[in-house]
Image: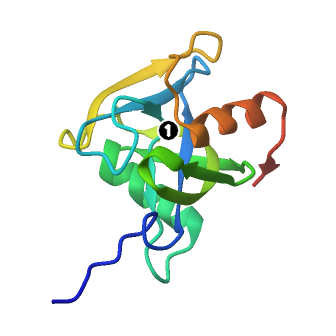
């Protein structure tokens, strides 16, 4: 029987996510459910894994549509994050984007992986935020991003 190799565990996974802003300049975060790939109970920006042959920006738009049912305008790219989760034996490279909500109202399209969606002010964030999201927020506040 062949062993199934998993991104992030058996080799470095490559993915990413998006800090999505609404008109009030709040960001949308998702609370990871028990069936999430990692860090259940923690808050993160929406995103996912890049598929073979897919460009990072296309992954970001696809994942947002799949997870939230919305369309976004990506306007910036943040530095990547080396997301090493020692407790769970995982290593991910996250490519991080900035976007505005373009069309639709966010819905939890993956309730098996996500417990909750919520808009947060940058001055009032939850305590348990995953590293790739926390770093992205810091980079945004420090204006360390490329405008696209």
Closer to us: 107 or 39: 39
Q: Is residue 142 left or right of residue 4?
A: right
Mark count: 1
Does residue 94 show up? yes
Q: Is residue 10 left or right of residue 109?
A: right
Closer to us: 99 or 88: 88
Give above or below for 22 relative to 33.
above
Give above or below for 58 relative to 117.
below
Rate crowding at label 1 as few (under 14), some (14 to 19) or many (20 or more) other CA atoms within 10 Å. many
Give above or below for 4 relative to 138.
below
Q: Which residue is at a point 38% across and 46% down the rendered structure image?
A: 38
Q: Which of the 4 image quarters holds residue 19? A: top right
Give above or below for 75 relative to 122.
below
Does dot 1 land on a helix, a strand or a loop? loop
Q: Which residue is at a point 31% across and 53% down the rendered structure image?
A: 66
What is the basis of the colouring in this image? rainbow
Does residue 99 show up? no
Across and down, in percent, residue 46 comes to: 45, 43
Across and down, in percent, residue 12 comes to: 54, 69
Closer to us: 89 or 78: 89
Q: Which of the 4 image quarters holds residue 41? A: top left
Q: Residue furthest top?
A: 124
| Residue highlighted by disc 1 | 45
Q: Which residue is at a point 65% across and 11% down the rendered structure image?
A: 123
Q: Quadrant of the C terminus?
A: bottom right
Across and down, in percent, residue 98 comes to: 64, 43
Q: Residue furthest bottom?
A: 1
Q: Which residue is at a point 58% across and 10% down the rendered structure image?
A: 124
Closer to us: 104 or 124: 124
Q: Quadrant of the N terminus?
A: bottom left
Across and down, in percent, residue 81 comes to: 67, 51
Q: Which of the 4 image quarters holds residue 138? A: top right
């Amino acid at each position: 029987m062949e062993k199934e190799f998993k991104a992030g565990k058996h080799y470095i996974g490559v993915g990413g996510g998006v800090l999505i802003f609404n008109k009030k300049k709040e960001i949308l975060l998702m609370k990871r459910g028990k069936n999430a790939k990692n860090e259940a109970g923690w808050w993160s920006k929406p995103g996912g894994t890049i598929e073979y042959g897919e460009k990072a920006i296309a992954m970001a738009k696809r994942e947002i549509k799949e997870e939230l049912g919305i369309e976004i305008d990506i306007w910036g790219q943040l530095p990547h994050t080396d997301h090493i989760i020692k407790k769970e034996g995982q290593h991910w490279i996250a490519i991080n984007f900035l976007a505005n909500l373009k069309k639709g109202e966010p819905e939890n399209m993956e309730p098996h992986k996500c417990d909750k969606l919520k808009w947060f002010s940058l001055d009032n964030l939850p305590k348990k935020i995953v590293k790739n999201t926390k770093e992205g927020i810091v980079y945004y506040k420090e204006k360390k991003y490329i405008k696209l």
